Image (tube, rainbow, N blue to C red):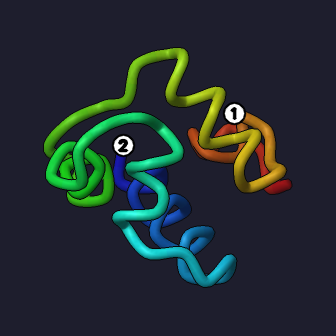
Amino acid sequence: MKIFQERLTELRKLNKLTQTQVAEYLHIRQPSYIRYERGDAEPTLENLVRLADLFDVSVDYLLGRSEY
């Protein structure tokens, strides 16, 4: 899970998005999104796919299963 947190935070910052903006994109509250970045919660499958789409990466990349 640690790699997911790191990649999620890195991608958000590289894309110059705030936690609030990503939360709004996912249709969740900001505290829920913050828990993803902290590793306190895992996204639903639907939100995992949405995150991959938002950052134009694969789900495998987000989960640390690939390097791109």
Amino acid type at image mark 1: Val
Identify the residue at horizontal 76%, vertical 40% (top origin): 53
Please indicate whether residue 47 sits to the left or right of residue 32 in the image: right
Q: Compare residues 48 and 54 and report the one nearer the observer.
A: 54
- The percent coordinates of residue 64 (x first, y second) are 61, 45
- The percent coordinates of residue 26 (x first, y second) are 47, 38
Q: Callout 1: helix, strand or loop?
A: helix
Identify the residue at horizontal 36%, vertical 43% (top origin): 1
- The percent coordinates of residue 62 (x first, y second) are 62, 45
Which residue is denoted by mark 1 in the rendering?
Answer: 59
Q: Compare residues 11 and 15 and report the one nearer the observer.
A: 15
Which residue is denoted by mark 2 in the rendering?
Answer: 1
Amino acid type at image mark 2: Met
Mark 1 Cα-neighbour bin, 10 Å: few <14, some 14–19, many ≥20: some
Identify the residue at horizontal 66%, vertical 82% (top origin): 14
Please indicate whether residue 21 sits to the left or right of residue 62 in the image: left
Measure the C-alpha gap from mark 1 to mark 2: 13 Å
